[in-house]
Image: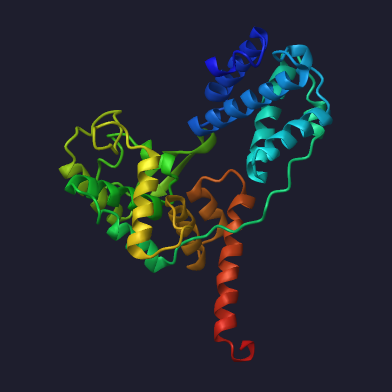
Amino acid sequence: MSQILTYADPDVLMHQAEWMKRLQHGKGASANTLEAYERDVRQFLGFMTGHRGRPAQLSDIADLSPGDIRGFLAARQRNGAGARTLGRGLAGVRSFIRHLEKQGQASSAGVMATRSPRQPKSLPRPLTPVDAITVTEEAGAMANEAWVSARNIAVMTLLYGCGLRISEALSLSGTDLADSQARSMRIRGKGGRERLVPLLPVIHEATQEYRRICPYALTGDQPLFRGTRGGPLRPQIVQAEMRKLRGLLGLPESATPHALRHSFATHLLAAGGDLRTIQELLGHASLSTTQAYTGVDGARLMAVYTMAHPRAR
């Protein structure tokens, strides 16, 4: 919070702190969402400070106009923010203003009347089934220690075998996956939503091997996956390992850890899985989010048709 002290008066900062607490404890927002929203509102308060020529006050944001919000978005865009970043930034500001409105301190009419930037339509970019399996098998190829190799294989196997987000895999504790006979596992995802994901034998094999040779005690509430010094494994390490794998296996830059989650969904759909089930397995709040994978599968079918049909050549 020390970064925003010059951007707003104490009463604004007090309301912001209350809003952050409500998001965390009342809404169950993830750590990533909290960090992004705090940054978005901090940047908005900084914009208002420059706009007014003094630290932002409640009176400055009590009755914002759409022009004020558009000015903020335009400033972000000039600094290189893309449509997705702008859309998330607007969502953060809206959430904060709505919080102030509930406290009788502001009106959300202006911010709600501002349309979100048009988002580019892009399909998820999954790996092929062969490449996805190869990634899980070769994930430990470049590790210097056997236990790190086993860890990397276990993490990548979870991402593809269960369709987990990186944050979900790395939030597992020592008690998770301890029972090698368990057929499912409960995952707490975005927005605090819980879901059951099935556990394939290959997942148990990978995680049990990692548990067997990991030099750190994997018990209780301690993190299941550890860094080389024993602390929690960070997402950046997993991403770096995937970059090494891309070079080793000759995969495109779209082959990221999150692409394994996309691959999980796309391959299930291609094999006949129904959309509602895949939605549940992924933990999507809305079916429309899961429907993006129908476009991926449709694109694949059209590519096969174009290559194979005699009249298409």
Name the spot of residue 270 as percent of width and height, x first: 50, 67
Check the image and report above or below for 79 versus 266: above
Name the spot of residue 258 as percent of width and height, x first: 46, 50
Q: Residue furthest top?
A: 10
The way the protein has been coloured in the rendering is rainbow
Count of labels shown? 0
- Res 107 quadrant in image: top right
Residue at 54% across, 51% down: 279
Q: Which quarter of the figure is the C terminus placed in?
A: bottom right
- Res 54 quadrant in image: top right
Residue at 72% across, 34% down: 75
In the image: residue 257, left or right of residue 296? left
Q: Nearer the viewer, residue 73 or 63?
A: 73
User: Is residue 1 among the parts visible in the rendering?
Assistant: no
Q: Which quarter of the figure is the N terminus placed in?
A: top right
User: Is residue 39 among the parts visible in the rendering?
Assistant: yes
In the image: residue 91, left or right of residue 140? right
Q: Nearer the viewer, residue 119 or 273?
A: 119
Q: Residue furthest bottom?
A: 310
In the image: residue 58, left or right of residue 152? right
Name the spot of residue 200 as percent of width and height, x first: 32, 55
Residue at 18% across, 46% down: 145
In the image: residue 235, left or right of residue 201? right
Name the spot of residue 49 as percent of width and height, x first: 71, 18
- Res 99 quadrant in image: top right
Check the image and report above or below for 121 versus 186: below
Residue at 66% across, 14% down: 8
Q: Nearer the viewer, residue 6 or 309?
A: 6
